[in-house]
Amino acid sequence: GRGGEALAWVAWAAEMPPATREEQVALEATEASRARLEAASKEQLSAREAAMQAKVDKAERATDKVRARHDALAAELEKTRERLRGVDEREAAVAATEKTLKRRNALLERERASLRAALQKTLAALGPSDE
């Protein structure tokens, strides 16, 4: 069974001569180059991550600028609306004042007319003046 195969392999490995100096050097060089490749790919990955993070940061700064501009414009718009409301209120007050003045004017005109009529009557009652 399997146990037998494993034992056979162990026996075969035990019979193999130890690695030669050349094989050992080649193995170490392979291991070193694998480690270098791994380190380089890690560096590349972190450089890529840093570049992506920089792009994200730049986009966030741009978004913040746009948001700040939007907020400033919204505040400006609100101020303008307030000013317009003030203008509308003043216009309404002016219109009301004009209406009141016209009404008073009409009353004064009627009063003047009735006073003129009374004066005419009084003068007529007095008769022609003796000059």
Image (cartoon, grey):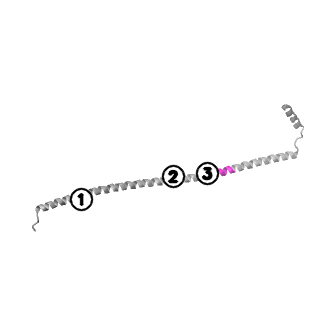
Describe the element under mark 3 as helix, strand or loop.
Answer: helix
Which comes before the other along the chain, label 2 or label 3? 3
Name the disc covering residue 73, or none: none
- The residue tagged 1 is 109
Q: Quadrant of the N terminus?
A: top right
Q: Are marks 2 and 1 in contact (CB under 8 Å)?
A: no
Number of dots carrying numbers: 3
* Amino acid at pointer 1: Glu
* Amino acid at pointer 2: Asp
Q: Are marks 2 and 3 in contact (CB under 8 Å)?
A: no
Q: Are marks 3 and 1 in contact (CB under 8 Å)?
A: no
Q: Quadrant of residue 119?
A: bottom left
Which comes before the other along the chain, label 3 or label 1? 3
For marks 2 and 1, give the CA distance: 57 Å
Name the disc covering residue 57, or none: 3
Characterize the local packing of mark 2: few (<14), some (14-19) or many (20 or more) Cα atoms within 10 angstroms. Answer: few
Q: Nearer the viewer, residue 55 or 88?
A: 88
Describe the element under mark 2 as helix, strand or loop.
Answer: helix
Range of magenta residues: 47-56
Decide if residue 33 is on the left or right side of residue 68. right
For marks 3 and 1, give the CA distance: 77 Å
Q: Residue at x 34, y 56 (%)?
A: 95
In reply to whether residue 16 is colored magenta, the answer given is: no
